[in-house]
């Protein structure tokens, strides 16, 4: 076990026997070594826990916890964070993999900006290279005007643990917990823009996000989260900017519905 690890890698798992070994091995291959790997199983019915415990028996940096009852995605992410002792939290799902240089990049970039509360993968800029520090207001405005910062998954982020705890972590809302958390963090903390290539997001049929019903529910919940963020008294935008954002979001929603309709018509026509 490493005393005072700088990074707590949080791996939540549920029935991931097919992938978890690859996820763990990708962490162990990291060139950055001052970390703890916290694995929290949410009541798997397969061999996930046994595989994780096999790795924990060989490397003291790995800690495995098993929930007494199933908590669900975001509550389990909070549970994993409650075990963390590092300065930074780095989520890595049990079906994803870390690049060998990913932690080195993330920690190096965050430590250049001690005032930043979190970092998110972002589209590159033409004018300046990564890492890029932006204010809370800039993070909000860029999200709405081309960058879409807050659509990132937890695996795309690194979070200062003190900021995560100050904001109360994930609310537990299904489908939109990460989307909501980025709004919460960006109310009070500056953000570091990071490159995408620090981890590999595996796509497979077992993911909840692949179901159409989930996507429909998520769209409705995102509207609620967005409006809550804009109405919050600590929203970093001016009243005029909020009005502009609402108008722009409404326009984009209309465009999206039109494109969806065209797509359905074309599909039925066999085009």
Image: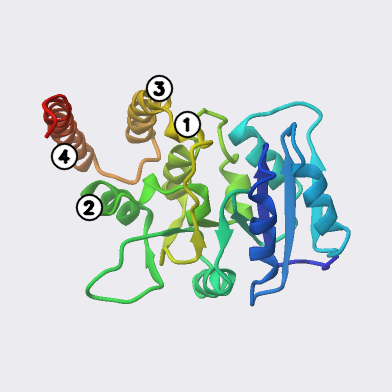
Element marked by disc 1:
loop
**Residue 146's mark?**
2
User: At 73% across and 49% down in the image, what residue appears?
Assistant: 39
**Residue 244's mark?**
4
Pointer 3: what residue?
Answer: 213
Whichever of callouts 1 and 3 sits on the residue coming sooner in the sequence is 1
In contact (CB < 8 Å): disc 4 and disc 3:
no
Element marked by disc 3:
helix
**Residue 175's mark?**
1
Residue 77: give x, y in percent of width and height. 64, 41
C-alpha span from label 4 to label 3 = 31 Å
User: At 83% across and 67% down in the image, what residue appears?
Assistant: 3
Q: Nearer the viewer, residue 50 or 63?
A: 50
Whether residue 263 sits left or right of residue 83 in the image: it is left
Element marked by disc 4:
helix
Quadrant holding the C terminus = top left
Q: Is residue 95 above or below residue 130?
A: above
> In the image, which is nearer the foreground, mark 3 or mark 2?
3
Residue 196 image-quadrant placement: bottom left
């Amino acid at each position: 076990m490493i005393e005072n690890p700088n990074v707590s890698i949080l791996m939540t798992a549920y029935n991931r026997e097919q992938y978890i070994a690859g996820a763990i091995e990708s962490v162990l291959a990291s060139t950055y070594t001052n970390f703890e790997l916290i694995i929290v199983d949410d009541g798997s019915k397969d061999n996930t826990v046994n595989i994780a415990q096999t790795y924990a028996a060989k490397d003291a940096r790995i800690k495995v916890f098993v929930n007494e009852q199933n908590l669900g995605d975001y509550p389990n992410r909070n549970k994993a964070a409650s075990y963390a002792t590092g300065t930074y939290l780095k989520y890595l799902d049990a079906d994803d993999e870390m690049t060998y240089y990913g932690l080195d990049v993330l920690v190096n970039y965050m430590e250049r900006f001690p005032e930043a509360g979190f970092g998110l993968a972002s589209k590159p800029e033409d004018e300046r290279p990564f890492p890029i520090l932006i204010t809370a207001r800039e993070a909000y405005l860029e999200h709405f005007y081309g960058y879409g910062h807050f659509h990132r998954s937890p695996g795309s982020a690194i979070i200062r643990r003190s900021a995560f705890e100050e904001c109360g972590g994930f609310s537990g809302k299904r489908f939109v917990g990460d989307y909501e958390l980025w709004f919460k963090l960006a109310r009070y903390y500056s953000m570091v823009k990071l490159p995408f290539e620090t981890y590999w997001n595996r796509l497979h049929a077992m993911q909840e996000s692949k179901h159409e019903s989930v996507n429909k529910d998520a769209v409705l919940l995102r509207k609620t989260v967005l409006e809550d963020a804009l109405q919050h008294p600590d929203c970093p935008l001016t009243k005029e900017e909020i009005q502009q954002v609402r108008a722009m979001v409404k326009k984009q929603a209309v465009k999206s519905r039109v494109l969806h309709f065209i797509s359905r018509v074309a599909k039925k026509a066999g085009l």
